[in-house]
Image (cartoon, grey):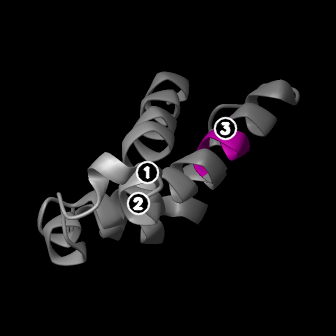
């Protein structure tokens, strides 16, 4: 999960943010908002946010007195409804 969240952060910071903000002159006119939605980049920001919180929950649970059936199960149960966003992506 840590590796996955790091990869999502790279995608958001390196590609998505510059494309959405059009900070770089060369990026203007290259890709439209509709194009971003079509290739799923808009959903990545939401996926990154949820998976960052999921990683935080896992890290906190593992840091406590280890009880895999109680602690990790609770984290998965809490985040299961948010994983439906992967259908859109």
Measuring from the top left, give residue 85's x and y in whole percent: 33, 68
Asked whether, in this view, residue 5 is left or right of residue 75, the answer is left
Q: Earlier in the sequence, mark 1 or mark 3?
A: 1
Is residue 34 magenta-colored? no
Q: Nearer the viewer, mark 3 or mark 2?
A: 2
The image position of residue 72, as x and y in percent, is 63, 40
In the rendered structure, does residue 57 fall within the stretch colored magenta?
A: yes
Mark 3 or mark 2: whose residue is earlier in sequence: 2
Span shown in magenta: 54-58
Please tell me how crowded label 1 is: few (under 14), some (14-19), or many (20+) other residues with Cα within 10 Å: some
Q: Main secondary structure of the magenta part?
A: helix
Circle 1 sits on which residue?
18
In the image, residue 45 above or below residue 15: below
Confirm or deny contact between disc 1 and disc 2 (CB under 8 A): yes
- Disc 2: which residue: 22
Instruction: Describe the element under mark 3 as helix, strand or loop.
Output: helix
Residue 29 location, quadrant: bottom left
In the displayed image of the protein, which residue is found farthest to the right?
A: 65
The answer to whether the residue labelled 1 contacts the one labelled 3, judged by CB atoms less than 8 Å apart, is no
**Alpha-carbon neighbours of circle 2 within 10 Å: few (<14), some, or many (≥20)?**
some
Numbered badge on residue 58: 3
Query: Would you say residue 70 is visible in this rendering?
Result: no
Q: Which residue is located at x 83 percent, y 26 percent? A: 63
Picture quarter with the C terminus = bottom left
């Amino acid at each position: 999960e840590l590796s996955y969240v790091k990869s999502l952060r790279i995608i958001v910071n390196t590609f998505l943010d510059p494309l959405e903000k059009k900070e770089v002159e060369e990026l203007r006119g290259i890709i439209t908002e509709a194009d971003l939605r079509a290739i799923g980049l808009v959903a990545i920001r939401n996926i990154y946010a949820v998976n960052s919180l999921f990683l935080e929950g896992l890290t906190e649970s593992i840091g406590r007195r280890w009880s895999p059936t109680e602690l990790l199960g609770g984290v998965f149960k809490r985040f299961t409804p948010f994983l439906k966003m992967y259908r859109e992506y």
